[in-house]
Image (cartoon, rainbow, N blue to C red):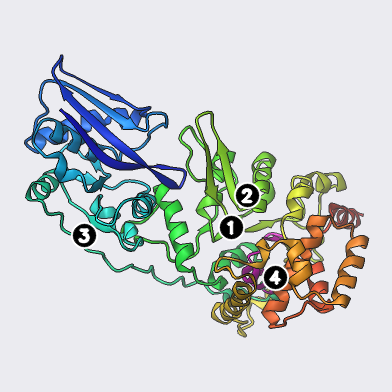
């Protein structure tokens, strides 16, 4: 007897329809799975068989063939356990095909018949809501209901065991799962006011937050670079609903979503160690998974001690920083993961960390400084909009009880600047860092005097076309923070001050310090 159960599988961060066909026929007892199954899918027959036996429905001693259609796309994951079990039950006559015809089923089975959570439930829910008729019910594990509830207009059913689902299907009633309210994690207790001094760096981070720009903090050890970067999320604007769904989908596919929360409501902050591989940073693997740049989607990717990362790993950032996506190509498929992150990086100016420090002499040779700074390639440095020096902090400043501006006040200004950008571009997800440079030239409010200054300075600094437009984007953000409709010379001048300094300056400072 032939059964057909509708299901879905995740490819990248999107889902596609899969029909699980199960044929229970006369022949030697065997179980064959076809349709390009990965190892985890092939092993499902052992989990399904044990779950059926422990639920009181032992598979018959017949030839069972499972096909996962379309058969030309590789299937991975454990979400096919539950639909395969239902297909076997229909094939052996324990369930009617009609009972499961209005269901899309996904779930992993334990050996005792319990239904366990899966990856990518939000992506599956979005696919079902967009392609299935309105009377379709998505059957999925109870632990995945919270994330699937983000998709409106979709009927959800969440049995805890296979036996419970069988009873519901036989009765012809699939109870609607209780949609739990979204739980918001406790607020972060960090505050940028805790960082003593460093007002220039705080100003640069506010600009980076307002426009979605990348930033690089350069300074000696102990100057507060890491403290500043870790407080960047506290001044970022609140995630919109659309951004929250995108971020949640990425974390769900990666298996990093907290079931008790159900949705990511705070901007991600990812801080990988410098020993990370290229695949770990940008994604990959035999079954491609999102990397750190995708897990930082709509958030911050922080690279502490940036120049300690292998150069090949750093160079892999160039394409996602420019395009906002990562494309991973394999022989069987090409997958695209979103990666609209704001890069925040910190580095020392030289191997010993004290080049340019007026309080401590640098002991590095000029050639060592040159070699050290060359680990950051010119093309990658050119893609980082804001470069700011973080000088050493005098010890006397640590005892100053006067606190600077707090995160809440800065975030309010950042929110206002982002609102101006949404209105300008007509896109709720838009920010100046992603704006087309040519469009900003024509419609961004650049004054004649501002253009003259930008052109003259650009020629003297030998800015590339990319560098020219990145200065323009930063200047537009500065104007938005000030509430100005036009980009005036002061905005351009400040933006030019954040362009990367050449390594020659660091070398010269090292020579002077060594003399």
Circle 4 residues within 10 Å: few <14, some 14–19, many ≥20: many
Q: Mark 4 points at which residue?
A: 204
Rounded to the nearest angstrom, the CA distance separating label 1 from label 2 is 9 Å
Under tag 2, what secondary structure? helix
Task: Tell me how far mark 4 sits from mark 2, CA to CA.
Answer: 22 Å
Tag 1 secondary structure: loop
Closest to the observer: 455 or 254?
A: 455
Task: Give me the disc on residue 341.
Answer: 1
Judging depth in this view, the residue of 261 and 472 nearest the camera is 472
**Magenta segment includes 337:** no
Mark 1–mark 3 distance (CA, rounded to whole Å): 34 Å
Whole-angstrom CA distance, mark 4 to mark 3, is 47 Å
Query: What's the magenta region?
Result: 203-221
Which circle's residue, 1 or 2, is located before the other in the chain? 2
Closer to the eye: label 1 or 4: 1
The quadrant in which residue 208 appears is bottom right
Q: Which residue lies furthest to the bottom in this view?
A: 402
* C-beta proximity under 8 Å, tags 1 and 3: no
Q: Are marks 1 and 2 in contact (CB under 8 Å)?
A: yes
Disc 1 or disc 3, which is closer to the eye? 3
What is the CA distance from the residue labelled 1 to the residue labelled 4? 17 Å
Q: Which residue is pictured at 65% across the width and 43% down the height?
A: 316
Is residue 394 in view? no
Q: Nearer the viewer, residue 326 or 54?
A: 326
Check the picture and name the quadrant holding the C terminus.
Answer: bottom right
Q: What residue is rendered at 86% in x and 71% in y?
A: 451
* Residue hosting label 3: 177
Are circles 1 and 4 on residues that touch, CB within 8 Å?
A: no
Q: Which of marks 4 and 3 is nearer the N terminus?
A: 3
């Amino acid at each position: 007897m032939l059964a057909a159960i509708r299901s879905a599988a995740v490819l990248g961060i999107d889902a596609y329809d899969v029909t699980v066909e199960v044929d229970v026929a006369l022949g030697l007892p065997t179980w064959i799975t076809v349709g390009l199954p990965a190892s985890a899918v092939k092993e499902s027959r052992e989990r399904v068989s044990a779950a059926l036996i422990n639920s009181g429905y032992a598979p018959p001693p017949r030839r069972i063939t499972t096909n996962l259609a379309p058969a030309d796309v590789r299937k991975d994951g454990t979400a096919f356990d539950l639909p395969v079990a239902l297909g076997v039950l229909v094939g052996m006559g324990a369930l009617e095909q009609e009972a499961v015809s209005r269901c899309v089923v996904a779930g992993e089975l334990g050996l005792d018949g319990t239904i366990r959570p899966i990856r990518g439930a939000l992506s599956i829910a979005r696919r079902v809501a967009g392609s299935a008729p309105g009377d379709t019910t998505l059957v999925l594990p109870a632990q995945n209901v919270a994330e699937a509830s983000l998709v409106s207009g979709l009927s959800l059913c969440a049995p805890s065991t296979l036996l419970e689902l069988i009873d519901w299907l036989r009765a012809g009633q699939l109870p609607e799962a209780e949609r739990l309210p979204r739980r918001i994690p406790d607020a972060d207790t960090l505050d940028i006011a805790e960082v003593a001094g460093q007002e220039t760096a705080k100003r640069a981070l506010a600009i980076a937050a307002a426009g979605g720009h990348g930033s690089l903090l350069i300074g000696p050890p102990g100057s507060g670079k890491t403290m500043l970067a870790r407080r960047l999320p506290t001044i970022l604007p609140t995630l919109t609903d659309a951004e929250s769904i995108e971020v949640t989908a990425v974390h769900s596919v990666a298996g990093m979503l907290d079931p008790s929360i159900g949705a990511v409501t705070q901007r991600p902050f990812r801080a990988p160690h410098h020993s990370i591989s290229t695949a770990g940073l940008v994604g990959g693997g035999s079954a491609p998974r999102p990397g750190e740049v995708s897990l930082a989607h709509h958030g911050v990717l922080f690279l502490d001690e940036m120049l300690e990362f292998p150069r090949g790993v750093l160079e892999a950032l160039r394409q996602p920083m420019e395009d906002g996506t990562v494309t991973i190509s394999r022989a069987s498929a090409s997958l695209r993961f979103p990666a609209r992150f704001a890069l925040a990086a910190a580095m020392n100016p030289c191997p010993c960390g004290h080049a340019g420090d007026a309080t401590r002499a640098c002991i590095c040779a000029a050639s060592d400084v040159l070699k050290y700074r060359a680990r950051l390639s010119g093309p990658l440095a050119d893609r980082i909009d804001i470069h700011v020096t973080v000088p050493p902090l005098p010890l006397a400043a640590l005892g100053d009880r006067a606190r600077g501006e707090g995160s809440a006040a800065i975030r309010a200004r950042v929110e206002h600047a982002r609102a101006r950008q949404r209105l300008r571009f007509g896109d709720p997800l838009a920010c100046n860092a992603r704006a087309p440079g040519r469009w900003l030239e024509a419609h961004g409010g650049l004054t004649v005097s501002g253009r003259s200054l930008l052109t003259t300075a650009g020629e003297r600094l030998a800015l590339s076309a990319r560098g020219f437009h990145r200065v323009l984007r930063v200047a537009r953000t500065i104007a938005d923070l000030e509430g100005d409709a036009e980009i005036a010379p002061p905005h351009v001048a400040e933006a030019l001050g954040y362009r990367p300094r050449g390594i020659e300056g660091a070398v010269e400072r090292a020579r002077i310090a060594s003399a």
